[in-house]
Amino acid sequence: MKISADFDSGNIQVIDASDPQRVLLAMRPDLNSYHFQWFHFQVDGLQPGQRYGFSLTNAGQSAYNRAWDGYQAVASYDQLDWFRVPTRFEDGQLHFELQAEHECVRFAYFEPYPRARHERLIAKALERGAELVASGRSLEGRDIQLLRIGGQAGARLKLWIIAQQHPGEHMAEWFMEGLIERLQNPQDAEITALLAEAEFYLVPNMNPDGAYRGHLRTNHAGQDLNRAWQSASSERSPEVLFVLQHMQRLGVDLFLDIHGDEEIPHVFTAGCEGNPGYTPRLAALEEDFRSRLVGIGAEFQTRFGYPRDEPGQANLTLACNAVGQAFDCLSFTIEMPFKDHDDNPQPRTGWNGARSQKLGQDVLTVLAQMVATLR
Ligand code: GEM
Ligand code: ZN
């Protein structure tokens, strides 16, 4: 049996692979940071029919160590169909097992969004008429594409959506893929009407270095990008600086920042209720967005989420709060689960890429309904 993680978004260290029933592994922390939770590795040389067991021995020390309860790891034989495998968290270790059906399998924390797929997503979007507004550079020199879709003469609003500031939150780029696919469908009447009023500024992946390196939360400098929106710098967070400069140049009428949550088994939003500039207008827009997303039958709910910030107590280093405050616009963090959306459990896959894509498309329906009210 051979275990490897030397590939895009790979992360694992082998401690002892001598017992195939209990292979001992550890997650590697983000470079220059103490965070870890993401894992992704390949096992070759399996014997079909045999049962294998794997233990992440440092799960109890991970960034969100309370998140393992109710969590099931994902596996795939072809890197297209990802399914959950029996998993339990016990004595600080995460144990999962597989009855092998093929000689080679991959395991991951969540269905990975590959960098190669990112390149195809960008190329296809450009072929279909998206414009590359600018390309930022990560610390390691990877491209951070800012796309514009729309841009029709009468489109008065600028709607911004960014994803995967936290590199282990791969559901975020799946969401973007679904959203871009729908935005570029010329047969979609709702989208045609929306694009007559608004143009979209999209950053499908904010943190390509972290994603490539198999990080959970930070970039190459160990910086959590979603804590850098008051202090963006070319040394530590050029990814954020790039987007902020274009926002200041172009303006923002709506902002969505797409994330995944390790712990909560639901899709939810976090808003700007703690911002000093929060107003009844913004509160009404938030309420309208949430109730419409529930109303159209999207996989979304409003009962579970983060505790609400007290008035004036928002952390303005977060993108959602910083942008909402600076541009006086509707601004949300959208959170999808690593586990499942328990309002609509799907045990074979849990929450996955396809459900994230669909959520991206459903959010567009709500934006189409609300576009006249955003500003
Ligand atoms: C988040 S986003 C937290 C938003 N919270 C409030 N109260 N507005 C983060 O950056 O920690 C969660 C995530 O990473 O997905
Ligand atoms: Zn996040």
Image (cartoon, rainbow, N blue to C red):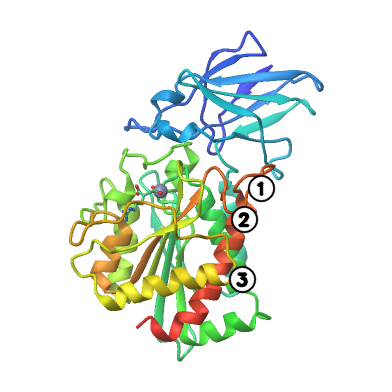
Which mark is nearer the camera, 1 or 2? Answer: 1
Amino acid carrying mark 3 in the image: Arg
Which mark is nearer the camera, 3 or 2? Answer: 2
Q: CA–CA distance between discs 1 and 2? A: 10 Å
Give SS at disc 1.
loop
**Is the C-beta of the residue carrying label 2 under 8 Å from the nearest atom of ligand 1?**
no
Q: Which residue is mark 1?
A: 346
Q: Earlier in the sequence, mark 1 or mark 2?
A: 1
Task: Report the residue that reaches farthest toward the bottom.
Answer: 154
Find residue 269 and name its label.
none
In the depicted structure, whether residue 186 falls above or below residue 274: below
Q: Position of residue 306 (x, y in %)?
A: 36, 51
Q: Earlier in the sequence, mark 3 or mark 2?
A: 3
- Rendered residue at 57%/49% (across/down): 342
In the depicted structure, whether residue 282 falls above or below residue 30: below
Give SS at disc 2.
helix
Q: CA–CA distance between discs 3 and 1? A: 24 Å
Q: Residue 255 sits in which quadrant?
A: bottom left
- Rendered residue at 45%/45% (across/down): 167
Q: Earlier in the sequence, mark 3 or mark 1?
A: 3
Q: Which residue is mark 2?
A: 355
Q: Which residue is mark 3?
A: 182
Task: Report the residue that reaches farthest toward the top.
Answer: 18
